[in-house]
Structures are given as structure tokens and as C-alpha cells.
Image (cartoon, rainbow, N blue to C red):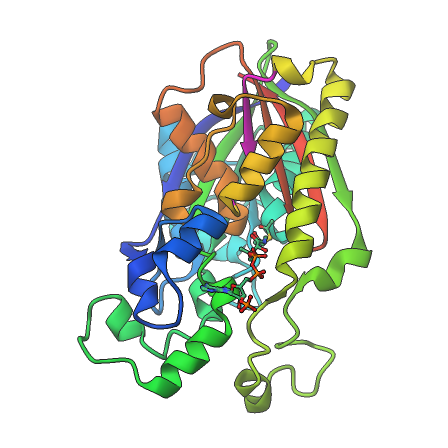
Amino acid sequence: MRSVITGTGIGVPPHVVTNAALSKLMDTSDEWIRVRSGIQERRYAEPGQGSSQLGVLAAGNAIADAGLTPSDIDAVIFATMTPDHVLPGNGPLLQKALGLRDIPTFDIRQQCSGFLYGLELADLFIQSGRYRRVLLVGAEVHTAFMPWHLGWDTLIGQSMREITEAERIENTASRDRTVLFGDGAGAVVIEGRDGDAGLGPIRLHTDGTGAGVLTMLGASFKRRPFVTHEQIDAGETLPIMSGKEVFRSAVTLMPQVVREVCELSGVAVDALDLVLVHQANLRIIEGVQKALGLSADRVPHNVERWGNTTAATLPILFHECRQQGLIKPGMNLMFTALGSGLHWGAALYRT
Ligand code: ACO
């Protein structure tokens, strides 16, 4: 028996924010963002709209797509680094909102690799016979990290006021990160099925020596109290990132782990029909594609429209590839991701 993705869905917020709109708030430009990241626009959630709600939208769509009802789901895995609350996790919130039965819900992190880690768990649950139908959700609302109280109203078209010089300076201080991220959710239903189609080998890695490369110092339970006004004023509730190191790790380690999974499964790299790479940055995606020696059409991307949605990028991309008819029966598809942790990995999926 194999673990098969039988339904997919996405849940995205309504506000489309272009690079030009961001340029009104800080010193940046459409050209800088496009050239460095490939991103043209992203979606932002409303204040008050959490990642659990986007996850509920995505999950409802995935369950319907699988031809199931919420009461058919046996377990939930919810991957997010931006949960609605520190406690409880998004799992129980989604269970209540969707009207799921009294089933276990697992909240996992692993940031950009959250979906891959969730695939591993779902596969183990199904292969062990413990749960038959697993709902895996990746959802993020990154905008809460950002200093958008300084111009949020202008950004989403609710005000025509000019940004003050002080607001512009503060917004510009985090421009190397804020322009890269968007909000959104993707979900898949995974079921056990006989036959050749389904998840193949998965390989996951962690290197905690790279924990400081992409991290958030604020809101830490090592502090007393865990968050203070001073930390907020110092910008410590925003992730810090060594962009160049993340870039280097991503273009080296993702091709490496893809090759590792190819070896484990006996599938040659050039026999991969599609490689779905975590959508952080178009230059990283192209770097992975070139390192694997694959043609561009085999490495699809949508980072242009969504930005980096962390745990949601892979399920959103998989859903869109299905919708566009790119995924046909009998294909060898590879998922790969790398992110904060460092966590990275790859999973083979036969369609
Ligand atoms: N607009 C305009 N200028 C900017 C912006 C911006 N939004 N952000 C930074 N700059 C400026 C910098 O201040 C710097 O100016 P200076 O030369 O006067 O000091 C200049 O642009 C160049 O900055 P670099 O950091 O050298 O730019 P680089 O070419 O390295 O690109 C980037 C930065 C896009 C962050 C790149 O390093 C990258 O893509 N890294 C990967 C990060 C990533 O994808 N993280 C996502 C999370 S992890 C993951 O999902 C894999």
C-alpha cells in the first residue's frame, strides 16, 4: 500500500500586494524585488485573519476535492511557524471550525520544510495502519511579523494618506525580509491505496549548527517576560536572516538531497518529470534546476504570484500544477525544501 494524495486545496487572503505598492511604504523597487527574488506580488491577510482560518479554507477545499466529508478524516497534521496563538496550536482550531470528529491533531513547525516533515508523518501513520485518511495543512500569516501598522491602511487601499518619513525609515530597515514573504495556505488529503502510485522514499535532514542563519530572537521563553516593549521597539519580533547563507545552503543542499532520494528509489535524476522546489526565491529555484541538470519546464514555479508562503508553498504549487494539467499519471515527481533549522529534505511521489 502507498500513501496517495487524493485531494488538494488552497486558501488565500484577498489583498494582492504588488511590488509597486510596497515601494510606497519603503525604499525599494519593483526592479530590485523582481531581479533578486522573481516575486511580483503576494497576498496579505487582514488583521484578525489567522493562519488557522486560511488553513480551514484550504482543508475544506482539499476534503471536497478528495470526494470526502470532514467526518472522514482520521488525523490532522498542521504545519505552521505563524500559528494564531502560542497555545493551543492551530490543529484544534481547525478541528472545531471544520467540524471534524474527535481525532488527533498534530501541530508541527519545521518552517519552510514543514510540508515535507508532514508528508513523512502522514506516510508513517498510513503505513502503520494507525490512520487511513490524513489531512496535511501548511498555512502562514507572515504579515504579523511586519511593521505594517506603519502604512497598512495605505497598502490595502483603505487610505490615501502619505507615509511619513519616520514610517518610511522604519519600514526600510526590514526591507531585505519583508518583501519576500506572503500569506496563504495549502492542504492535501492523503489516503492509503494499493498500486504503484504514491509516496516513495523521503529523506529529511536537520543541521542545528545553522539555527542562527534564519531565526527570530523576540518572544522567547528564555526571557522574563517572554516579550517586552523594548524587544518590539528593537525589531526583535521580526525574523533575522543571513540571506546569502540561506541562498548558498538552499542551492547546495536541495540538489544533494534530491540526488539522495533518487539513489534510494532507483530513479535517475533525468527521469524526474517534475521537481517541486520550495518557493522562496526564483533564483534559488533556478539554481536547483541547473544543479540537477534539468530543463526549466520540469521545475515549475509560482513564487511570482504568492511570494514565500513558508509551509504553504509546496501544497499550493502541487495544487496549481494539478489544476494546470501538468501532473499526469505515471510521473516521477520530487518535492524538495530547505528552511530555518536548518531543516531540509526531499520526497519522491509517483503519480
Ligand atoms: N529593496 C531595495 N534594496 C534592498 C532591499 C529591498 N527590498 N533589500 C536589501 N536591499 C539592499 C541592501 O541594503 C544592499 O544595499 P547595499 O549594497 O547598499 O548595502 C543591497 O540591496 C544588496 O543586498 P544583498 O543582501 O547583497 O542582496 P542579495 O543579492 O544577497 O539578495 C536576498 C538578498 C534576496 C535576500 C538573497 O540573499 C536571497 O534570496 N537569499 C535567500 C533568502 C530567502 O529566500 N529566504 C527565505 C526564507 S528561507 C527559505 O525559504 C529558503
In the rendered image, which quarter contains the N terminus?
top right
Across and down, in percent, residue 11 comes to: 36, 46
- Residue stretch rendered in magenta on the structure: 272-279
Task: Give the quadrant of residue 222.
Answer: bottom right
Q: Residue furthest right?
A: 209
Across and down, in percent, residue 136 comes to: 53, 40
- Name which residue lies at 71% across and 39% down: 252
Task: Give the quadrant of residue 235.
Answer: bottom right
Image vertical order of residue 194 relative to residue 314, above or below: above
Q: Residue furthest bottom?
A: 230
Residue 195 appears left or right of 160: right
Q: Quadrant of ligand 1?
A: bottom right
Q: How many marks?
A: 0
Magenta stretch contains residue 277: yes
Across and down, in percent, residue 220 comes to: 67, 76
Q: Nearer the viewer, residue 43 or 108?
A: 43
- Name which residue lies at 45% across and 49% down: 35
Any part of residue 105 in sight: no
Image vertical order of residue 288 relative to residue 269, above or below: below
Q: Nearer the viewer, residue 305 or 133?
A: 305
- Name which residue lies at 44% across and 57% down: 51
- Name which residue lies at 38% across and 41% down: 10
